[in-house]
Amino acid sequence: MRPSHLLKVLLVPTAVLIASSCGLGTDAEPTSLSVPQDVFPAEVSESSEVNLSANSTFHPVFFFRDELLVEIQRRLPAPVFLDEPLNNLLNGPTDIEAESGYASAIPAGTAIVDVALLRNNTISIHLNQTFFEIEGEQRIRASAQLVLTASALIRDTQGVVFFLEGKPVQLPNGEGLIEEVPEGRSPSPLTVDDYVTLTMRG
């Protein structure tokens, strides 16, 4: 018998013996096995990290640092829907970011009820009552964070409009000015340009 044929013959009963000693069933149902962490080579681990990066994307969120709006890139799992970067913003800065001086004006308990892209490329954001309980400078800054983060979601967006319980609510621009809207008309969308004073040093 040729050596290669002998090897094949020996391998078959050996494999059967191993399967029997491991207590594996002969049925078609899958069996869970405990796999040691070091069973795979390092190359496999590195490949997994690459695949993880391929299944995620970065989106900007905006916080305040030294009185100015600053962009921070956040990694989010793909595909990213409109509400995910905004909800990430509502989580506030991480502990490390907070230690570095980043802060949010958006009050704890604020929730995104709904977010949608309208036909005119305007983003509508429906918020809960908690957000609208803040006033003054905090409302200006919180509005700016939402507008800049939302505007980064869509290319060539025409701005952002806000709603509370289905009704449009006009929020202040960077100067604290609120548009006077005639009854029956919708407020103009707020854009990044409305908060330019909060992104530039004087």
Image: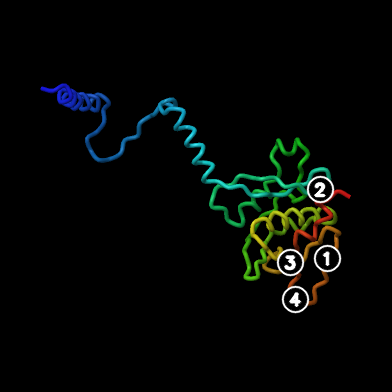
Comparing 23 with 96, the one in front is: 96
In the image, taking residue 138 as reference, residue 163 lies left or right, namely left
| Residue farthest right in this picture | 202
Mark 4 highlights which residue? 185
Query: What residue sits 49% from the left and 41% below the top?
Result: 51
Give SS at disc 4.
Answer: loop
Q: Residues within 10 Å of mark 1 (few under 14, many from 20)?
A: few
Mark 1 highlights which residue? 178
Query: What residue sits 69% from the left and 59% below the top?
Result: 127
- Quadrant of residue 186 within the rendered picture: bottom right
Using the numbered discs, state the Cα–Cα distance from disc 4 to disc 3 in whole angstroms.
12 Å
Residue 132 locus on image (x, y percent): 76, 59
Q: Nearer the viewer, mark 1 or mark 3?
A: 3
| Residue farthest front in this picture | 2
- Quadrant of residue 28 within the rendered picture: top left
Comparing 21 with 197, the one in front is: 197
Give SS at disc 1.
Answer: loop
Residue 201 locus on image (x, y percent): 86, 48
Using the numbered discs, state the Cα–Cα distance from disc 2 to disc 1 in whole angstroms.
21 Å
- Above or below, 163 against 60 in this view is below
Tag 2 and tag 1, C-beta contact below 8 Å:
no
Q: Residues within 10 Å of mark 4 (few under 14, many from 20)?
A: few
Q: Which residue type does callout 3 highlight?
A: Pro
- Above or below, 182 against 55 in this view is below
Q: Which residue type does callout 2 highlight?
A: Leu
Q: Residues within 10 Å of mark 2 (few under 14, many from 20)?
A: some
- Above or below, 51 against 192 in this view is above
Mark 3 highlights which residue? 189
Tag 4 and tag 3, C-beta contact below 8 Å:
no
Mark 2 highlights which residue? 68
**What label sits on residue 133 in the rendered view?**
none
